[in-house]
């Protein structure tokens, strides 16, 4: 393959400090740079070895306030992050639940485990990790509870 993962997702927020604090606390993210050019504040937030969020706070822009249910959000519906390991997935899940950002439900898609969250702006995200309990050739539909978390 010619691609080695997601480089960045561009996100709108009304409160960069709150946004970055959440991702720093839950995902150990690092702010690489933040600058303001007129009405636009742009912050580069590293969330993985090769992945960042480009966080835009734009004066008088209320797009971050508009929340729409899944699959009604246009072409980009949510971001999916890949946990570094099952232990990292468990730590992220614990942090998300403690922050009230997730109910902790884990879906078993077969080769991948997944849990959803909502950040302080209401942006939905998903954390995925290879499933250590996967059975070859088995794929499950959304909402299939993972045995190791619901059993």
Image: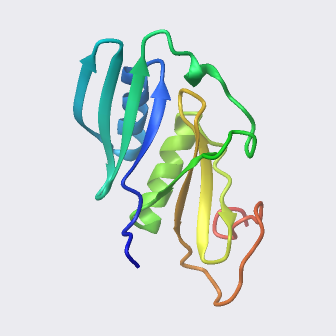
Q: Quadrant of residue 45?
A: top left
Please determine whether, in this image, residue 148 is positioned above or below residue 65: below
Please determine whether, in this image, residue 46 is positioned above or below residue 107: above
| Residue that lies at the very extreme toward the top in this rendered image | 60
Name the foreground residue: 106 vs 111. Answer: 111
**In this rendering, position of residue 148 left or right of residue 95:** right
Q: Position of residue 25 (x, y in %)?
A: 38, 37
Q: Position of residue 3 (x, y in %)?
A: 39, 70
Q: Position of residue 111 (x, y in %)?
A: 60, 77
Image quadrant where one finds the C terminus: bottom right
Residue at (26%, 18%) from the top-left corner?
36
**In this rendering, position of residue 111 left or right of residue 59:** right
Please determine whether, in this image, residue 41 is positioned above or below residue 60: below
Residue at (35%, 12%) from the top-left corner?
39
| Residue that lies at the very extreme toward the bottom in this rendered image | 136
Total number of numbered discs in the rendering: 0
Image quadrant where one finds the N terminus: bottom left
Q: Position of residue 18 (x, y in %)?
A: 42, 23
**In this rendering, position of residue 132 left or right of residue 138:** left
Name the foreground residue: 38 vs 33. Answer: 38
Residue at (66%, 76%) from the top-left corner?
110
Residue at (23%, 23%) from the top-left corner?
35
Q: How is the image coloured?
A: rainbow
Name the foreground residue: 37 vs 125. Answer: 37
């Amino acid at each position: 393959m010619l691609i080695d993962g997601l480089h960045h997702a561009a996100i709108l927020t009304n409160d960069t400090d709150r946004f970055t604090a959440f991702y720093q606390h839950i995902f150990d993210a690092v702010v690489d740079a933040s600058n303001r050019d007129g009405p636009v504040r742009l912050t580069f937030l590293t969330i993985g070895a090769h992945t960042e969020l480009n966080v835009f706070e734009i004066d008088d822009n209320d797009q971050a306030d508009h929340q729409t249910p899944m699959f009604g959000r246009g072409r980009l519906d949510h971001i999916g992050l890949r946990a570094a390991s099952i232990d990292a997935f468990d730590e992220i899940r614990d942090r998300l639940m403690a922050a009230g950002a997730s109910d902790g439900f884990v879906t078993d898609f077969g080769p991948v485990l997944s849990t959803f969250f909502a950040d302080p702006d209401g942006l939905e995200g998903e954390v995925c990790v290879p499933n250590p309990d996967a059975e070859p050739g088995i794929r499950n539909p959304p909402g299939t509870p993972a045995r190791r978390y619901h059993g």
